[in-house]
Image (spheres, rainbow, N blue to C red):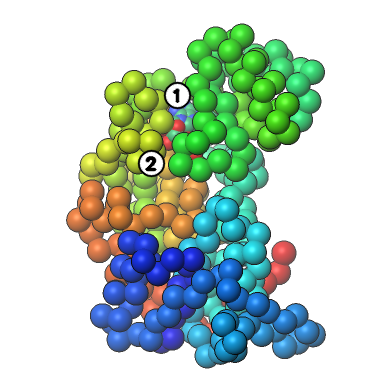
Amino acid sequence: MKIAIISRNAKLYSTNRMVEEAKAKNHEVRVIDPLRCYMTIASQRPTIHYKGEELTGFDAIIPRIGASITFFGTAVVRQFEMMNVYSINESVAISRSRDKLRSLQLLARKGIGLPVTGFAHSTQYTKDLIKLAGGAPLVIKLLEGTQGIGVVLAETGKAAESVIEAFRGLKENILVQEFIKEAKGADLRCFVIGDKVVAAMKRQGGEGEFRSNLHRGGNATLAKLTPEERLTAVRAARIMGLNVAGVDLLRSNHGPVVMEVNSSPGLEGIETATEKNVAGMIINFIEKAAKPGKTKTRGQG
Ligand code: ADP
Ligand code: MG
């Protein structure tokens, strides 16, 4: 097969590992920087050009679209979909997963366990919003943050009010969320491919840190999931429409709750913690799933 990995940086661990595994299985593989693609949108004949060359003949793409380039990156993925190229994660699903509010609404509709979450545009009713989310301590987070940046723990109602007002003053969109204290600064990263959790790790935040992000100094170990946790992770990925997803769960005293669903989950942490060949499993999935015309949305919506 001819596979393109849509990634800004061929040197990244995740990109590199997928190239390695694709080559090992005798596929032709290329890394395409989405920001160097340019496209024509003419009726019935969409094309993509890259550094002066027209890109043709790809059977499948693996999008690895960073949060900072979601807008243009998903447009490139959509263009491939319009050209009938199979995308392991489709552009609509990637856009959905980037917006925490939209994701939580979709998951809530289907009865997935979530922390009690509030959101508002105006700061006029902040006190009531805090009450609805269960009162302090509360977690306040930016709608489009990543790597734990923009996630704040407010221990008192007063602190919550000031943080909410400060963020809103900066015109940032935020969520106000029940603090899952019993998770003790740990979360579960469940790596889903298709309808299976293929690897899972527990990430524990550093001393005195409630955020478990590895970028914030957390450390990762192999995790053993309960059947309920597995089911929650697989269902969350399916609801988002992602074939490859990193579903983050917290162990709460009301069962597993979903934090977020990541559409470009990193491979380094999970492969190291679990000693599993996750990159190889992604390529195996593509071999089975990628058929012309198998793109569900064909660039719709
Ligand atoms: P990001 O997208 O920046 O990673 P997250 O929503 O995943 O933002 O939050 C980062 C980390 O903060 C989570 O992995 C978790 O450890 C902690 N955290 C976030 N929300 C809560 C919450 N409601 N209760 C307890 N811990 C939380
Ligand atoms: Mg996170």
**Residue drawn 72% across and 82% down?**
40
Placement of the C terminus among the 4 image quadrants: bottom right
Give left or right: position of 16 versus 258.
left
Specify the amino acid type for callout 2. Answer: His
Q: Distance between the residues labelled 1 and 2?
A: 20 Å
**Callout 2: few (<14), some (14-19), or many (20+) C-alpha neighbours within 10 Å?**
few
The response on whether ligand 1 sits within 8 Å of label 1 is: yes
**Callout 1: few (<14), some (14-19), or many (20+) C-alpha neighbours within 10 Å?**
many
Labels 1, 2: front one: 2
Name the image quarter holding residue 37.
bottom right
Which residue corresponds to mark 2? 215
Which residue corresponds to mark 1? 180
**Residue drawn 67% across and 23% down?**
166
Say what secondary structure mark 1 lies in.
loop
Q: In this view, does 152 lie above or below 290?
A: above
Q: Is residue 55 above or below residue 177?
A: below
**Farthest residue in the front direction?**
51
| Residue 258 visible from this viewpoint | no
- Looking at marks 1 and 2 on the same chain, the residue that comes earlier in the sequence is marked by 1
Residue 20 x/y as whole percent: 29, 74
Residue 230 x/y as whole percent: 36, 46
Residue 145 x/y as whole percent: 55, 41
Q: Which of 6 and 244 is in front in this view?
A: 6
Say what secondary structure mark 2 lies in.
helix
